[in-house]
């Protein structure tokens, strides 16, 4: 078993890895060819993208889903050349017809999978916009759902702009396109609680009117309202502690 993603390179085919499927989505190229894309992570949260070509989708797509741990044997690696990158690994895994894939028991080592960046990093323009990012914050302005073409109110034409804030009161504008716009609108309306937490994964940074905003990218982005994840609990605990400290300081002053 090859332990380190850093060792993976196109020089051979007989690689063998055990990984968690962090994200899995379908994509269509400019030429109309479909493929299945994935983001995989090992126990140390080293990440690599993977691709199932159109002709092999029927062989592998139904064998695993988001969140599964899988063992993958005998695959090819190809250099990533796209302008937008989901991981920092120079290569992606390409499924071969002869690949061996089996689901395996979950490994407890990979508990946190967000790998989020800070709000100041986005706002101060210190990040490489080639790489997609993840953020977590509180919704402070849910925005309104709009459609590019009011006569065709389907998800293909949907857009929604909302704002999220971190515990230091930094605010970032977020632009959800297509099905993500409708998803945010629906989940926000159903959300309950004094604080509504929004988790964004694999969003792109864009420059707009002299400031940075984040926006969904194709089908690979993720959006979750009040997800049941350790990172959400940690954020709420930080805010609770800060509010308790402020309350204690106010009481002492009085």
Image (cartoon, helix red, strand yellow):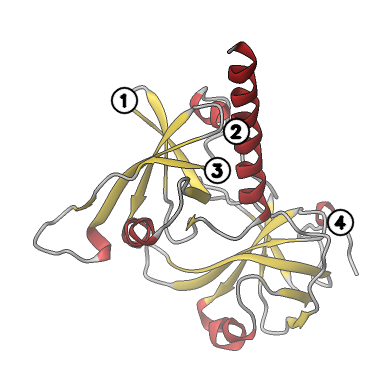
Lower position in the chain sequence, tag 2 or tag 3: 2
Evaluate if marks 3 and 4 touch, with contact meaning CB atoms under 8 Å apart: no
Residue 4 is marked as 4
Q: Which residue is mark 3?
A: 135
Q: Is residue 238 above or below residue 194?
A: above
Mark 1 vs mark 4, CA separation in Å: 42 Å
Residue at position x 82%, y 51% in the image: 6
Question: Of helix, strand and loop, which one carries label 4?
Answer: loop
Residue at position x 64%, y 85% in the image: 63
User: In x, y percent, where is residue 141?
Assistant: 34, 40
Q: Which residue is mark 1?
A: 209
Q: Is residue 142 above or below residue 120?
A: below
Q: How many residues crowd around disc 3 within 10 Å: few (fewer than 14), some, or many (20 or more)? A: many
Mark 1 vs mark 3, CA separation in Å: 21 Å
Mark 1 vs mark 2, CA separation in Å: 21 Å
Q: How many residues crowd around disc 4 within 10 Å: few (fewer than 14), some, or many (20 or more)? A: few
Mark 2 vs mark 3, CA separation in Å: 7 Å
Q: Classify residue 114 as left or right of residue 104.
A: left
Lower position in the chain sequence, tag 1 or tag 3: 3
Question: Of helix, strand and loop, which one carries label 2?
Answer: loop
Q: How many residues crowd around disc 2 within 10 Å: few (fewer than 14), some, or many (20 or more)? A: some
The outermost residue toward the left is 151
Question: Of helix, strand and loop, which one carries label 3?
Answer: strand
Lower position in the chain sequence, tag 2 or tag 4: 4
Evaluate if marks 1 and 4 touch, with contact meaning CB atoms under 8 Å apart: no
Q: Classify residue 237 as left or right of residue 184.
A: right
């Amino acid at each position: 078993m090859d332990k380190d993603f850093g060792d993976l390179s196109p020089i051979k085919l007989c690689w063998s890895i055990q990984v968690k499927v962090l994200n899995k989505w379908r994509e269509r190229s400019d030429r109309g060819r479909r493929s299945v894309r994935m983001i995989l992570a090992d126990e140390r949260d080293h990440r690599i993208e993977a691709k199932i070509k159109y002709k092999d989708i029927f062989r592998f797509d139904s064998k695993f889903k988001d969140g599964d741990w899988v063992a993958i044997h005998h695959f090819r690696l190809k250099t990533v050349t796209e302008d937008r990158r989901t991981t920092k690994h120079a290569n992606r895994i390409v499924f071969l017809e002869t690949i061996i894939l089996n689901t395996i028991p979950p490994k407890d080592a990979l508990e946190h999978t967000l790998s989020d960046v800070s709000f100041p990093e986005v706002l101060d323009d210190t990040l490489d916009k080639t790489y997609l990012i993840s953020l977590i914050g509180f919704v402070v302005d849910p925005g309104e759902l709009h459609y590019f073409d009011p006569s065709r109110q389907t998800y293909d034409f949907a857009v929604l702009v909302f704002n999220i804030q971190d515990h230091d009161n930094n605010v970032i504008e977020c632009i959800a396109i297509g099905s993500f716009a409708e998803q945010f609108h629906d989940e926000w309306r159903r959300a309950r609680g004094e604080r509504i937490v929004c988790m964004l994964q694999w969003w792109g940074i864009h420059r707009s009117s002299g400031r940075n905003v984040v926006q969904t990218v194709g089908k690979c982005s993720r959006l979750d309202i009040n997800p049941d994840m350790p990172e959400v609990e940690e954020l709420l605990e930080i805010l609770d502690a800060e509010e308790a400290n402020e309350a204690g300081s106010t009481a002492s002053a009085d």
